[in-house]
Amino acid sequence: MKKIIVLALLSCVLLACNSQQKENKAMSQEDSEIAKKVEVLISKMTLDEKIAEMTQDAPANDRLGIPYMKYGEALHGLWLVLDYYGNTTVYPQAIAAASTWEPELVKKMASQTAIEARALGVTHCYSPNLDVISGDPRYGRVEESYGEDPYLVSRMGVAFIQGLQGMGDEQYDENHVLATAKHFIGYPENRRGINGGFSDMSERRLREVYLPPFEAAIKEAQIGSIMPGHQDYNGIPNHMNTWLLKDILRDELGFNGLIVSDNNDIARLGTMHFIAENRTKAALLGLKAGVDMDLVIGKIEKLAAYNNNVLKDTIIKNPELEKYIDKATSRILTAKYKLGLFDTEPKEIDTETVNAGKKEHQEFSYEMAKKAIILLKNEGNVLPLDMSKIKSLAVIGPNAHEDRPKKGTYSLLGGYSGLPPFYVSALDGIKAKVGDKVKINYAKGCDLLSNSKAGFPAAISAAKKSDAVILVIGGSRRTGGEGADRDNLDLYGVQKELVTAIHKTGKPVVAVLINGRPLSINYVAENIPSILETWYLGIRSGDAIADAIFGDVNPGGKLTVSFPRSVGQLPVTYLERPDFIGSGKGLFINSDKSPLFPFGYGLSYTTFKYGTPKFENATIGTDGSTTVSIEVTNTGKRAGDEIVQMYVRDDFASVGRYNKMLKGFERISLQPGETKTVTFTLGFNELNILNQEMKKVVEPGTFTISVGSSSQEKDLLTAVLKVK
C-alpha cells in the first residue's frame, strides 16, 4: 500500500514538473517568436528609423507598420502628462495607499488604472515609485513612496506591478499595460533632502535598503521597464553607470526589459553632471550603459540626446556603434509586441469605457481611503463624535475645502494626479454626513501660503459658537511633491498660530492632517486631543474623513514613515543600528531622539491585546524554516482592524545590522471579543543577511523575533529563535 501511495505521489510530482516545463517552454517559445519578429524588423529599418524609435511615444512608422506607444503616469490613478483628459479616477496617494498595509488594495487600484489607461490609448506608464524614503521628509517626494522600509515597499510595489501589467496569461493583455519602476536607485539618499541631489553611500546600504524593492519587482512581478534616477551614485551618474544598469540590474538581477531615462537625463550628463562635453557624447554614454529610451517631455529638441541630429553622423562614421542602437530599438519593439500593439489598429479614445467604469473605480477609491486613515492621538476618546450630542460643529482650516481648479488638478490630491470629475473636500464630506442634523460653521482661518491672520477672528467666532471643532491643516501640492523640498517641517504659514488660537477657545478639537510628508507638529501633538493623519485620500477624501470623524469607519491605518520632532533630528527612521555605547539613554545633548510618531504606529477606537509569540519549532537549521504565531484579541466595544507586524534581528552576526527590520505584516479585522491567530513564516528570506562578501546567507546563532502593533519597543512582544 505504501508503495502505491509513493508511486502515486511521484506521478503527481512528475505531472506537475511536466506541466511547469510545458508552461516555461510555451513562454520561452512566445518570447522566441517575438525575438525573431524583432530581428526581422530591425534588419529592415534604416538608421534614421531606429533612432526615431528611441524616444517616448515615438510616432508610428507607417512604412514598416510599427505602432505608436503612448505613455502616462499611474502613481495613484492615470495622469496624461501633456495630452489633457479629465474624468480619470484619482486614488489615495502612494503614501496613503501604503498606510492601508494591504497590498491587494494596491493591486486592485493598479488594475483599474490599467483599464482606464487602455481605454485612453495609453500602454506605457511611468509607475510605480519604488524609492525607499531614507528618513528625511524635507525631500518633497515622500508622498510618492510606500515608506521607509524596504520590505513594505517591496510588497506594495510587487502588488502594484502585478495589477498594472497583469500576470500569467493576462500579462500585457487588452486590460493591462507596461509598468516602469523608478527611480533606480537610491534616489532619496542625499545629504540635504534635495530632489535629485547626489547620493554617496556604501554598497551595503544600497543592497540592504534600496535594492530589495527592485529585486522583488523583477523576480516576482516581472517588471517590464525601469527608470534610473536623476542623481549620481558615488560620483557616477545613474544614466551612465554600467555597474548599476548592467552588472547589477541586468546580469545579477536578470532584468530583460527596457530602460527609459528620467526626463532630459541623457542630455543632463552634460548640462547637470558636466561629464559629457556635448549631447553626442552624452547619448553614447547613455547607450553604452544600456538606457534604451530618451524621455524628453514635450520633445524639446535642444534637450533631446537620442535623435538623428545628435547621433546619426557619429554612427555613420563609426558603424561599430550601431549595435547599441540596435539593442535599444530591439527592446522597445519587444515591448510593443508584448503589448499586442502590432496586432490592433489604433483606437479612438474610449470615453464610454472610462465613464462606464468610473463609478465602480470611484467607489473602490473610497474604500481604499477609509482604510488608509491613521489615528495618531485620541486623548479622552474625543473621537468618534456622537452626532446626537452635537448641535453645531466648526470646520476650520486652509485644507478644509478646495474649489474646482481652473487649471491643472486639485492641490489636495497630491502630486502626479489626474483631474477627476469631482473632489469631495473635508467640508463637503462632513456636510453630506450630518445633513440638517448638525449646524456647520465654516471658516477658512488662513491661507496655506500666506502669513496673514485676517481670517482668525472669523475662525475663533466659528469655534466659540460650536460644540466641537474639526481643524483641517497640513500641506498641499504647493508645499510638497516633486521640486517642493523644504528646510523646515513645521506647519506652513500661520497654521500653528491658528491651531493655538482655536485651542485657546477651550472647545474639543480634532486635528485632521491633509499632507504629503511627515511634519514636526509638536504643539498639535501636545495640545490637541485627537489627531487624524489622512495624507491625500483621493477623489472621495471628504467622505472617508467624515466617516472616521463620526465613527462609521474605525481608523486602522498605520504610519509607513516616522514623524520627526524637528529638522535637527533628521534623518529619523526606525532603521537604526545600535547606539554608541557612551550615549546613555539614546538622547541628543538636550532632547529626545525618538520620533514624534514611529513607523508602524496607529491607534484605533477599540483596543487590542496580544498573546505570546509561539514558534512551530524554536530551533532550526540554517537552511530550515519555521513559523511564529500570535493571538490578537479585540478587547474593546467596537469592531476594528489591527495591523500585526513582525520584525527580525540577527543578535550576533558577522557584520553590523539594523536593530530590527520588518519581515512580515498582516491586516486583520476583529469584532468585539473576537480573537484571531496571525502566523508568519521564518526562513531564508526573513533571516538572511549580507555577509562581508555581500552574499545573502543565514548565519547560525540567535534571532530576536518581535511581533506587535508598531516598531517601537513598548508595542512589541519578543521571542528568541535559535538557528544551528
Image (spheres, grey):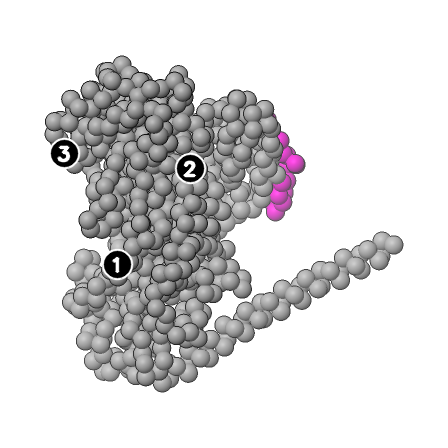
How far is the residue under mark 1 from the one under mark 2? 29 Å
Q: Which residues are magenta?
A: 611-626
Q: In which quadrant of the rendered view does residue 25 lie?
A: bottom right
Q: Toward the viewer: 178 or 637?
A: 637
Mark 2 belongs to which amino acid? Lys
Mark 3 lies on a secondary structure that is loop
Are circles 1 and 3 on residues that touch, CB within 8 Å? Answer: no
From what the image shows, is residue 246 above or below residue 403?
below
- Residue 133 visible at all: no
> Mark 1 Cα within 10 Å, few/some/many (few <14, many 20+)?
few
Q: Residue under label 1, please give it.
A: 84
Mark 1 lies on a secondary structure that is loop
Which percent across, then down, holds residue 255?
A: 43, 62
Are circles 1 and 2 on residues that touch, CB within 8 Å? Answer: no
Q: Toward the viewer: 583 or 544?
A: 544
Report the residue at 20% width, 60% height from top.
Answer: 268
Q: In which quadrant of the rendered view does residue 458 lie?
A: top left
Which percent across, then down, holds residue 130?
A: 38, 50
Q: Residue under label 3, please give it.
A: 450
Mark 3 belongs to which amino acid? Ser
How many numbered marks does the figure carry?
Answer: 3
